[in-house]
Each structure stands twice: as C-alpha cells, then as structure tokens.
Image (cartoon, rainbow, N blue to C red):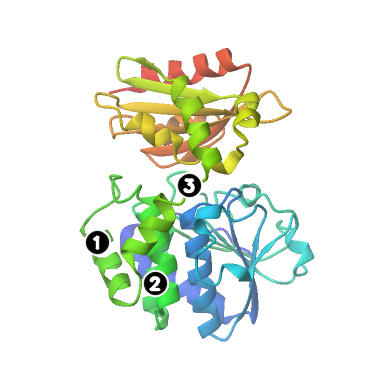
Amino acid sequence: MTHMTQQPIDESTHEAQIEMLLEAFRASPRFILTSHARPDGDALGSVLALAEILDQMGRQTDVVFADPVPAIYRTLPNVGRIHHTPSAADIADHSIPAILLECDGIARTGLLGLDENRPLINIDHHASGRHFASVNWIDEHACAVGAMVYRIAIAAGAEITPSMATCLYTAILSDTGGFTYASTNADTFAVVHDLAVRGANPAKIARDVYFSNSISKIRLLGSALSNLQCEGNIAWSWVTSNDMTLTGSDAEDCEGVVNYLISIAGIESAVFLRELPDINEFRLSIRSKGKLDVARIAESFGGGGHRSASGCTIQGPLDMAIDRIITQLRTGLC
C-alpha cells in the first residue's frame, strides 16, 4: 500500500472512494482497527461492524482502543474482541495497516504506535476531518460513521448479521442524538429501518443507551445542573475535579450532560466544561440548535466536530475558560 495523500472529494465520487477502501481491504491479510479516545456509540458500533465486514472478507482484524468501553456500550455484540491497550505496537508491528474511524488525525486515537511508518486508512464524517492517511473517505454529510460503514457493507456484498445491525443501529442512534440532530434525514431512517429488518432491536438498544445510567452519573448531573448559568440564548455549566470526587464519578459520567443544557427552551447554544484532573485544563462539550457553527469555534481552540455538536480543550482557571468560550458563543451567534 503506497502512501499518498488524496484531495477532498465531492458527493458524486463516494462510490469510487468506497471501492478504493475495498481494494485496500483486499490488499492486506491483517488490519488494526480503531477509533478515537473516549469512544462513543458511533466509534464502538462502527468499529465492531467493520470488523465483521473484514471477517467476512477473510481478513484478520485486531480491534484496539486506548480507553475502556463505557458501561452503556458493554452490551454491544462482540465487544469482547476489543483490546484495551496504550499502544497499537503491543498488538501488531508497523507493517500491519491501521484503519481509523472518526479521527481527524493519529493523535485523536490516543494510541501510541501509530505513525507515518504504518499504512493508514481514514474513514470520517466530521467537518474537521483531514486527509492524513494513504486512503481517505470523508463524508461530512453522513449522519454517522455507522451510516458510512453500512454503505461499505452493501458495496462489499457482506451479510448484515443481527450483531452487525445492532452495532450500526447503536452507532447511528447515538451520533444523531437520538435522531434529533440536523444530520438526520430520510436516508437516516431508511438505513435504520433496514437495520431493524436485519435484526437490530430498536427498543432494547435505546434502553441500553439511554436508560442504563450509573448512580454516580445522576449525582454528577445534579452537581452540573446546580451550576447552570444562562445569558440570553446561551447556557453553560461545569463540574470541577472536586465535584467528580464527591459524586464518585469519572469522565464517562460526563457524557450527555450538555444535552440537558441545549434542551432548554430559548437556548440556541450551550457548553459544558469538565475540569481535567491534575492539570489546569477543561474539556468542553459544545452544542447548538443550528444557528451557530460550533465546529468552527471548537477548531479555534484546537478541537473539532460537527456544526451542532463539537468539543475542545481550554486552559484554566475556570473563570477564564468560561469567559473565553462564552465570548465566542456571544459573537458567533447568527
């Protein structure tokens, strides 16, 4: 697999890009398969589904993540095949190609052992996606990488098994915010309809994703909502490391807190700040209802994501971090 950087593509060439991916899959007997650090439903569901596709193509696949699987996704089919390790080199040497899903670069995986010396394949749907690999397919209009993996399965002639359908439905459900984001359209429902026909259980998947919260997460949510602030059509909240210690929570428990802020009537943009332990930084989750492109704001702080859902990290202290992000939200609203 030769290393070359491709130029961005338009909608009419997606089929050609999928065929290039399939050619790359056929070119090697073994792959490392991964996604971003702090994996979410799209990352996990898409990776596990793509692993099944590669299995059917007769390829050996090592699924690797830098961080543990969040509790709400531990019921996913075949989740036990995921290796949790700090370095891809622990699994395979640099001759083995790596497939990265939902990453704008190698660093986003949080893994060591991935660099320019290893052949890379990049599949992403973020507006901040970059062509950093030997083979790249970026479709920022896709509602989820899971929807892209579904297209790969169809093009490959793979059997979409009940386990694959469950993983892909979970990916799409979670990355569309329960079918609430602007990326949700008729095509989205056509795909999830087909996945339900093929064995995904929508009610069970929704229960696993939305009704399996830990007590510590609910306690943390109470702390976050007690810090709620609103100014015009902007809402924000935060938790400190001390808040997390007192509630017995961890980073995983912070997922989804920002959605409570953006759900407030009249609010157009919202941000949730989580203090990172032992360093003077805050991890931000930013949301909008469409009037503000929060991906651009996140990118200005070194992060990225989608127009209505993005994230980044900002230096503290807390009052300074809040001031910096709220200033951007004030000036960026249409």
Which numbered disc covers residue 9? none
Answer with mark 2 or mark 1, whichever residue precedes in sequence: 2
SS at circle 1: helix
**Front disc: 3 or 1:** 3
Q: Determine the residue positioned at 25% across, 68% down.
A: 193
Answer with mark 3 or mark 1, whichever residue precedes in sequence: 1
**Frontmost residue, 90 versus 307:** 90
Q: Determine the residue positioned at 28% across, 60% down.
A: 188
**Frontmost residue, 100 versus 258:** 258
Q: Determine the residue positioned at 49% across, 48% down.
A: 129
| Circle 2 residue | 165
**Front disc: 3 or 2:** 3
Name which residue type carries label 3.
Asn
Answer with mark 3 or mark 2, whichever residue precedes in sequence: 2
Q: Quadrant of the N terminus?
A: bottom right
| Circle 1 residue | 189
Badge 3: residue crowd in 10 Å (few <14, some 14–19, many ≥20): some
Q: How many marks?
A: 3
